[in-house]
Image (tube, rainbow, N blue to C red):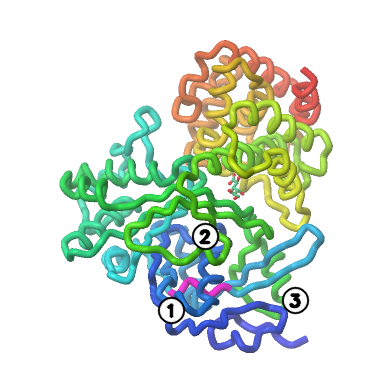
Amino acid sequence: MKSPISLGQKSLSQLPDDVCRPTYDRSQVTTGIVHVGVGGFHRSHEAFYTDLLLESGEALEWGICGVGLREADRRMATILKQQDYLYTLIIKHPDGGLETKVIGSIVDFLMGSDDPAAVIDRMADPGTKIVSLTITEGGYNVDPATGEFDASNADARHDIEHPEQPRLVFGFLTAALQKRREQGLPPFTVQSCDNIQHNGDLTRTMLVGFARLQNSDLADWIEREVCFPNAMVDRITPVTTESDIELLRTKFGIEDRWPVVCEPFCQWVVEDRFSAGRPDWQNVGVQFVPNVTPYEEMKLRLLNAGHSMLGIPGAVYGYRTIDECVRDDVFRRFLRQFFDVEVTPVLDPVEGIDLDEYKASLIERFGNPSIRDDVSRICLGSSSKLPVFLMPTIRENLASGGSIRLAALVIAAWCYYSDRQANRHGEPLAINDELKDELHAAAQGTRDDRLSFLRIESVFGDLVNNEQFTKTYAGMVDRIYQSPNMRRHMQDAMDG
Ligand code: CS2
């Protein structure tokens, strides 16, 4: 067999014919977008849409410069650089069909910790029109008690005192906006691509809150001049595995050290408010709408919550992937019942969307056997996901007298998971979460106080004071601790 071709600008023309690749002149592409947090999702979503747009040959000023702010980003920075910022997107269809597409829209990458000034300068450059973010639900530094910027965080305190050497994204954005203002440039748009309701509004509150601690005049200017469009983003992007790398090598003859895998489905619904113009993303399938709220709510409360409703009990039961959960009839019916009985009654109608079809399509997407989305990816960061994905549904059901049984069961399963750190067979389950220690300690308290886990205020707020919830929850905890056979408890919760 011929040896595989190392992915890079020079080798693009040698790739097999069935691999799509950029046909635009990448040497002419300039940075219009600076993106903070280049992981799998950015590369399957915004960079994918932007690559499609660059293919039209008329938008070469909209290239992307990636930015990493954490040491964990260094591996991505190094690999992308070695590959001239190219990577392969492997789109996996449910029937096993594969599409491979080399994406060329990322044209540069900077590490904030190596050279903060370079990142600030790039954001402040007149060519930059948008700074977009995928910093995860936990990255917004929200004080759970007030909903405002949490200034007690050590990095935040550092950034307030050292405006030129920031560590947090908000420090970088503020420094760059300050620079643009001094130079009489219009501000860039700050575009959040994280799974948070009103992600733009939240980013604005956090950034203005941070900036106010440094310079209140600048904070006023940001509040007045910068646009933060809300957006709903969607494409299931599992963690890349060694076997994906091997597949590219053996089946396509490509040596790519960090390809991205995703499902065929892709959606981006964005409010059309931009401070300094935007790419014509509408030409490549992005929807621009005046108000994204109903779309966001539908996606977060059904898709994202649905993932956790399978992934947490699935992990405890001993399943490895989401599609494995969906193939189990009990798990699949549990998910559908959660959608129909707990979410739908408290969801606002979404114009132009047939909710029945949407729910069915989610179950089909989750069941895509080629995606093999690991339950560990879903369980990761649950302490910042569930307050966004699941808590609003629970709160609204409690207020309206609706059902909370299925959600309570999953929270009880999460407590068991955090306590034992093992599945029902005793095999280890890692807690991968910023609140790891707190989750574990609170869950361990369950033996003496069955509501101990619910007392984590930053996750559950005052849920522990709701008797209707705690009664149901305590019963679920008892059963799971007696026997962690989640499948049986899911069946019982549906029956009861
Ligand atoms: C998942 C999301 O992280 C999670 O819990 O629900 O990453 C999900 O796959 C994406 O939002 C799909 O658009």
Three-letter amino acid code of the residue under disc 2: His
Badge 2 or badge 1: first in the primary sequence: 1
Q: Which mark is residue 453?
A: none
Q: Which residue is mark 2?
A: 42
Quarter of the image holding residue 358?
Answer: top right
Q: Which residue is mark 1?
A: 29
Tell me: 440 left or right of 188: right
Q: What kind of secondary structure does the magenta stretch mostly adopt?
A: strand
Near-viewer residue (411 or 211):
211
Badge 3 residue CB within 8 Å of ligand 1: no
For the point 45% across and 41% down, the residue is: 198
Q: Badge 3: how crowded within 10 Å, few (<14), some, or many (20+)? A: some
For the point 72% across and 56% down, the residue is: 371
> Residue 262 location, x and y as percent?
65, 60
For the point 18% across and 64% down, the residue is: 184
Badge 3 or badge 1: first in the primary sequence: 1
Is residue 105 part of the magenta span, yes or no?
yes
Tell me: 379 left or right of 35: right
Badge 2 residue CB within 8 Å of ligand 1: no
Three-letter amino acid code of the residue under disc 3: Thr
Magenta part of the chain:
103-107
Q: Are marks 2 and 3 in contact (CB under 8 Å)?
A: no
Quarter of the image holding residue 470?
Answer: top right
Q: Which mark is residue 250?
A: 3
Q: Are marks 2 and 1 in contact (CB under 8 Å)?
A: no
Calculate the distance from the C-alpha at mark 3 to the C-alpha at mark 1. 31 Å
Up the image or down, 4 lies above or below 40; here it is below
Tell me: 490 left or right of 450: right
